Image (cartoon, rainbow, N blue to C red):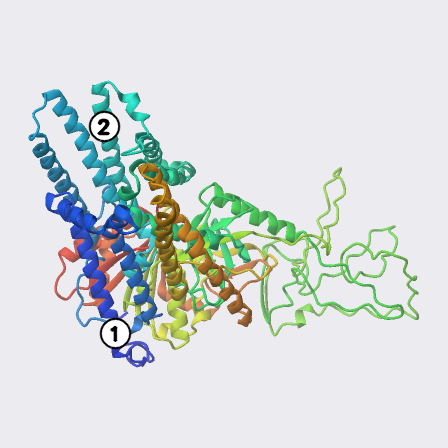
C-alpha cells in the first residue's frame, strides 16, 4: 500500500461526487432548537440533584412542593415533576428529534480536514476494575464520585448542626446520629437509583439519542448498581445498629406503619437487592451465569417493596428511570412472543453455528447490531445476545448470526442441528411412481454425490500404482458371483419396491443390444488424472460402492425413505432486537483497523460485507483503507474467513479498497496440512420448512413514529390514571397510608403502559401485518446449499492471487500492536483512524493501552487512533 493509494480518493462514486438532497433550513433550525432545549433541561436536572443535599436545594424543593401540592396530583405529583419529569420531557423531545432527522445519511457528515481527539474514543483507563474507560466515561465517573462525597459531607454537616440544637445525652445523640446518617444514605441511594434503570432499557429513546448501544450502557448499570447497593446496605446497617443499641431491633424490623416509613417492606426490598448484588460480581457471572440471571429477576420484588417502604412521593424521585424500563420491558415481551423462521442452520468444523433468520423489510439494522435469541427446543427461559454477521444490504428479508460453541446452551444447539442434519441425510428421495404399462421407465439425471458430472474441469489425485486405466463417470457394472442367478433389470432409483400388483415385465425381443463403453471421461473438456503407488482397484468418481458388512454381523437395513407424513425439521426461535449503535460509525472513517479475537470476527464479516456491497452497488462508502488483525487459537477457525468470498460480492474491490488481513494462529507453530493444501471448510446444514413468520417490528429501535407514540401514550396514560385515582378514590376515601399510596402509584405506572401503551402496540401490530401483506417477497438470493458445502481460500486463480497478496497467516505468534500501529502510522499519515475491537477484555486492554501510548507520544504527522469496543460482556 503506497502513499499515493492512501491519500487520493479510491472511489469514483465516493463521497466527493455523490449529491444529496439539501436539508431544509427550517428542519436544521428545529433540530438545533431541540438539542439546545434537551441540554438545558438535562443540565438543570443534574444541577438540582447536586444541590438537593444542601439546605438551599432542600428549601427550593420544599417551596416548589408547597406551591404545587394543592393540585389533584398532590405531593407525589410535585416530586415526580421535579425529579422524574425532566427525563420524560427529554424523552419526548428526543422522539421529535429522531422523527425529524429520519434515517439521516451518515455520509452527509463532513469529514474533518484535520484529525482531532474525541472524548468518547480516547481511552484514559485501560486496565482495572472498570475495564477500558474513555475520557467521556471518566468524566462521568468523576462527577458521580464528587457528588457522593459532596452529598455525604453536606448531610453530615446538616446532621451535626441539627443535633446541636437539642440538649440530649451523648448516647441518645449517637443513636440519633446513626439514624439520621442512615436516612441520608438512603436518600443518596434513591438519587442514584434514578439513573440505575436508564442504561438497561435496551431500546430506550434516550440511548438512541446519544448513540450509546445497550452493550456499552450495561457497564454503566453495573457501576451504578454497585454504588447504589453500597449506599442502601449502609442505609440499612446504620438503622440496624441504632435499633440494636436501643434493644428494639426485631420490633423495628417487623414494623409496618401506615403513616411514615414501613420498615418490613424495606427489609424485603433490601434482601432482594443483596441477593442480586451478591450474584452480580464477575466470578459469579462468569461461572454461574444462570444463577446471576435468575436472581436478577428479583428486581420486581425490589421495586415493588421499595414503593411499599417509602410511599408514593419518595418513590417518585426514582420513578422516571423505572417507568422507561417498564416501557422497554413490555415492548420486548410483545416482540418476543412471535416465533421466527430459521431459514438455515449450519455447523462449521471450528465449533461455530450459523443461523439465518427471517426478517421483514421494514425492520432496519446495521452491521454493528445484535439480537437476543431464544431457541425453545433448548430452553424457554434463556436468551443470548449475538452480533449480526450479515450486512443489511445482503437482503431485505433475512439476517444471519454466528454462534461459537462455548457453553452448555450453545453445545445443545450444535448437537440439535447435527442430529437433525444426520436424520435428514438418512431420509431418501420420495417413492417413484411406476410408469404406465407399455411405457419405458423415465431416465433420471444423476443424483446424490455424483459430482463428477457437475464440472467442466476435473482433477483426480490418487495415491498408489493403478493397475487399470482410471475410470471417470458412473461406476461400471459388477459381474455377479459364480453360480449366482442372472441379475434383473436395473432399478431406476433406490427405495423399496412399489406396492400393489404389477404386470410381469416381458422378456426383451431379439439379441441384446451391445453395451457401449463408458463415456464418463468424454463429458469434460479438460481432464487431469494423477495416480501413483499400488492400487488394487480403479479410482472411482461418483457414488461409492456399498461396503459389505463384517462376517457374522447382522444384515444392514436399507436407508429409510422420506414419507410425506413425516414432520418437517423445525427450530422454534424467538428474537428480541435489533439493538446496537444508532449510527454505523464504521462507515464514518476513511481508515479502519479491525481487531478480532476468535468469534469476534463475526461483526467484522458484516462490516466487510457492508463496505463491499456499498462499493459494488455504487453507494457512497467512506472507508478506503481497512486492516484486519485476527487472533485465533487453532487453524480450524480460519474457516470463518475462508467462506467469505470478497470477489463474489464485489469482483474488483481491490481497485477501490485497500484491504489487508493478518491472521495470528497462537497455538500452532506451523500449518497442520501438507504443503500446498489449503484449509477446507465443510458444514452440515439443515433447512427448516418456513412458516412465513419473520421477526416482529415491535422494538424500540424500529419505526420512530410508532415507538414515539408508544412512549407518549403510555406516559399520558400514567398521568391520567394517577389523576383519576386521586379524584375518584384517594381523596374521597381519605387514603393516607404511605405504603398503600406507593403501591397505587406503581400500579398506575404499570397500568399506563399496559392499557394505553398496549393499545398503541395493537395498532402497531395491525400496521405491521398490512405492511407485510403489501410486500412482495421476492427471492432474496440467500446463498444456501442443501449439500455439504466445500470451500477453499483458493477458489480460483484470481482468488488465490488476491489471498496471497492481502492475507498473511502467522503461526505461533501473537499480534504486536506496537509494531502494527507504528507501521500503520508511517503508511497512512496524518489521518483519523477508527480502531474497532471485538474480543476478550485482555485484547481490548492491549489495544487500548497501545492507542493511549501512541496518542500521548505521537508526532504532528502521525494519525490519531480512535478506540471503539464492540464486545458484549455482562
Residue 831 in percent (x, y) is at 21, 67
Quadrant of res 776: bottom right
Query: Which residue sits at x=60%, y=54%?
Result: 464
Q: Tell me which corner region of the image, top left, top right, bottom left or bottom right, holds residue 415.
A: top right
Q: Nearest the camera: 479 or 66?
A: 66
Label 1 secondary element: helix
Q: Residue at x 23, y 33 (%)?
A: 235
Q: Nearer the viewer, mark 1 or mark 2?
A: 2
Relative side of 400 to 166, left or right: right
The quadrant holding residue 733 is top left
207 relative position to 460: left or right: left
Disc 2, SS: helix
- Relative depth, front residue between 267 and 206: 267
**Residue that carries the numbered disc 2 in the rendered image:** 239
Q: Earlier in the sequence, mark 1 or mark 2?
A: 1
- Horizontal and vertical percent position of residue 764: 47, 63
Q: Quadrant of the N terminus?
A: bottom left
Asked if marks 1 and 2 touch (Cβ < 8 Å), the reply is no
Q: Which residue is mark 1?
A: 28
- In the image, 350 versus 404, the foreground residue is 404
Which residue sits at x=46%, y=51%? 333
Residue 95: % across, % down: 33, 63
User: How far across and down, in percent of the image, does residue 660 sit?
Assistant: 33, 64
Label 2 packing within 10 angstroms: few (<14), some (14-19), many (20+): many
Q: Is residue 668 visible?
A: no
- Is residue 278 visible to us here? yes
Q: Quadrant of the C terminus?
A: top left
Q: Is residue 506 left or right of residue 494?
A: right
Could you tell me how far apart the alpha carbons at marks 1 and 2 are, in whole angstroms? Answer: 55 Å
Amino acid at each position: 500500500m503506497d502513499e499515493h493509494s492512501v491519500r487520493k480518493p479510491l472511489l469514483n462514486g465516493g463521497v466527493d461526487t455523490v449529491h444529496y438532497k439539501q436539508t431544509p433550513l427550517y428542519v436544521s433550525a428545529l433540530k438545533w432548537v431541540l438539542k439546545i432545549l434537551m441540554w438545558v433541561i438535562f443540565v438543570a436536572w443534574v444541577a438540582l440533584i447536586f444541590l438537593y443535599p444542601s439546605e438551599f436545594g432542600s428549601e427550593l424543593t420544599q417551596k416548589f412542593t408547597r406551591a404545587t401540592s394543592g393540585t389533584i396530583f398532590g405531593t407525589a405529583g410535585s416530586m415526580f415533576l421535579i425529579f422524574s419529569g425532566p427525563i420524560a420531557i427529554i424523552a419526548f423531545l428526543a422522539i421529535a428529534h429522531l422523527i425529524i432527522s429520519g434515517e439521516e445519511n451518515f455520509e452527509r457528515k463532513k469529514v474533518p480536514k484535520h484529525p482531532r481527539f474525541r472524548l468518547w474514543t480516547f481511552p484514559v483507563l485501560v486496565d482495572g476494575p472498570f475495564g477500558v474507560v474513555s475520557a467521556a466515561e471518566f468524566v462521568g465517573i468523576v462527577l458521580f464520585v464528587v457528588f457522593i462525597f459532596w452529598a455525604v459531607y453536606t448531610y453530615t454537616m446538616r446532621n451535626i448542626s441539627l443535633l446541636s440544637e437539642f440538649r440530649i445525652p451523648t448516647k441518645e445523640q449517637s443513636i440519633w446520629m446513626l439514624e439520621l446518617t442512615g436516612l441520608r444514605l438512603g436518600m443518596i441511594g434513591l438519587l442514584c437509583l434514578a439513573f440505575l434503570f436508564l442504561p438497561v432499557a435496551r431500546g430506550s429513546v434516550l440511548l438512541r439519542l446519544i448513540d450509546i448501544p445497550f452493550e456499552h450502557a450495561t457497564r454503566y448499570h453495573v457501576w451504578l448498581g454497585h454504588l447504589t447497593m453500597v449506599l442502601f446496605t449502609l442505609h440499612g446497617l446504620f438503622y440496624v445498629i441504632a435499633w440494636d443499641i436501643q434493644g428494639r431491633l426485631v420490633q423495628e424490623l417487623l414494623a409496618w406503619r401506615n403513616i411514615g416509613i414501613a420498615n418490613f417492606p424495606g427489609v424485603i426490598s433490601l434482601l432482594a437487592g443483596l441477593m442480586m448484588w451478591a450474584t452480580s460480581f464477575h466470578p459469579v457471572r462468569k461461572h454461574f451465569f444462570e444463577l446471576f440471571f435468575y436472581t436478577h429477576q428479583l428486581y420486581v420484588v425490589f421495586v415493588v417493596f421499595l414503593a411499599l417502604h417509602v410511599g408514593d412521593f419518595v418513590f417518585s424521585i426514582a420513578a422516571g428511570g423505572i417507568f422507561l424500563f417498564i416501557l422497554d420491558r413490555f415492548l420486548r415481551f410483545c416482540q418476543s412472543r412471535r416465533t421466527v423462521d430459521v431459514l438455515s442452520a449450519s455447523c462449521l468444523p471450528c465449533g461455530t453455528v450459523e443461523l439465518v433468520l427471517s426478517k421483514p423489510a421494514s425492520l432496519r439494522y446495521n452491521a454493528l447490531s445484535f439480537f437476543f435469541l431464544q431457541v425453545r427446543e433448548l430452553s424457554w427461559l434463556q436468551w443470548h445476545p449475538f452480533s449480526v454477521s450479515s450486512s443489511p444490504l445482503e437482503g431485505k428479508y433475512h439476517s444471519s448470526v454466528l454462534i461459537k460453541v462455548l457453553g452448555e446452551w450453545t453445545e445443545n444447539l450444535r448437537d440439535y442441528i447435527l442430529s437433525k442434519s444426520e436424520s435428514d441425510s438418512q431420509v431418501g428421495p420420495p417413492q417413484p411412481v411406476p410408469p404406465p404399462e407399455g411405457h419405458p421407465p423415465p431416465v433420471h439425471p444423476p443424483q446424490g454425490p455424483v459430482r463428477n458430472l457437475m464440472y467442466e474441469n476435473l482433477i483426480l489425485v490418487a495415491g498408489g500404482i493403478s493397475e487399470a486405466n482410471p475410470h471417470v463417470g458412473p461406476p461400471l457394472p459388477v459381474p455377479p458371483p459364480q453360480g449366482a442367478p442372472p441379475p434383473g433389470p436395473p432399478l431406476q432409483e433406490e427405495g423399496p419396491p412399489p406396492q400393489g400388483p404389477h404386470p410381469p415385465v416381458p422378456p426383451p425381443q431379439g439379441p441384446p443390444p451391445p453395451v457401449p463403453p463408458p463415456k464418463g471421461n468424454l463429458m469434460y473438456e479438460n481432464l487431469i488424472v494423477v495416480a501413483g503407488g499400488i492400487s488394487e482397484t480403479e479410482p472411482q468418481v461418483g457414488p461409492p460402492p456399498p461396503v459389505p458388512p463384517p462376517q457374522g454381523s447382522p444384515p444392514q437395513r436399507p436407508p429409510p425413505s422420506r414419507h410425506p407424513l413425516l414432520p418437517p425439521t423445525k427450530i422454534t426461535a424467538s428474537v428480541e432486537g435489533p439493538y446496537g449503535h444508532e449510527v454505523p460509525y464504521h462507515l464514518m472513517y476513511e481508515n479502519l483497523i479491525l481487531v478480532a479475537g476468535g468469534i469476534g470476527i463475526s461483526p467484522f464479516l458484516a462490516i466487510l460485507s457492508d463496505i463491499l456491497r456499498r462499493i459494488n452497488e455504487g453507494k457512497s462508502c467512506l472507508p478506503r483503507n481497512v486492516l484486519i488483525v485476527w487472533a485465533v487459537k487453532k487453524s480450524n477457525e480460519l474457516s470463518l474467513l475462508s467462506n467469505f468470498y470478497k470477489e463474489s460480492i464485489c469482483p474488483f474491490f481491490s481497485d477501490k479498497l485497500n484491504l489487508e488481513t493478518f491472521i495470528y494462529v497462537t497455538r500452532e507453530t506451523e500449518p497442520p496440512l501438507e504443503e500446498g493444501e489449503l484449509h477446507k471448510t465443510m458444514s452440515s446444514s439443515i433447512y427448516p420448512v418456513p412458516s412465513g413468520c419473520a421477526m416482529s417490528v415491535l422494538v424500540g429501535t424500529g419505526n420512530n413514529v410508532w415507538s414515539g407514540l408508544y412512549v407518549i401514550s403510555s406516559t399520558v396514560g400514567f398521568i391520567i390514571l394517577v389523576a383519576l385515582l386521586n379524584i375518584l378514590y384517594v381523596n374521597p376515601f381519605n387514603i393516607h397510608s404511605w405504603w398503600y399510596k406507593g403501591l397505587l402509584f406503581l400500579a398506575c405506572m404499570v397500568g399506563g403502559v399496559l392499557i394505553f401503551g398496549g393499545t398503541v402496540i395493537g395498532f402497531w401490530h395491525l400496521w405491521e401485518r398490512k405492511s407485510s401483506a403489501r410486500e412482495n417477497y421476492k427471492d432474496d438470493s440467500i446463498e444456501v446449499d442443501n449439500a455439504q458445502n466445500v470451500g477453499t481460500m483458493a477458489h480460483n486463480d484470481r482468488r488465490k492471487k488476491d489471498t496471497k497478496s492481502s492475507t498473511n497467516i502467522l503461526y505461533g505468534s501473537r499480534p504486536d500492536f506496537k509494531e502494527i500501529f507504528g507501521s500503520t502510522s508511517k503508511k497512512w499519515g496524518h489521518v483519523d483512524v477508527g480502531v474497532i475491537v471485538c474480543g476478550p477484555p485482555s485484547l481490548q486492554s492491549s489495544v487500548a493501552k497501545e492507542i493511549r501510548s501512541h496518542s500521548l507520544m505521537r508526532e504532528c504527522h502521525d494519525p490519531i487512533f480512535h478506540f471503539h469496543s464492540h464486545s458484549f460482556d455482562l
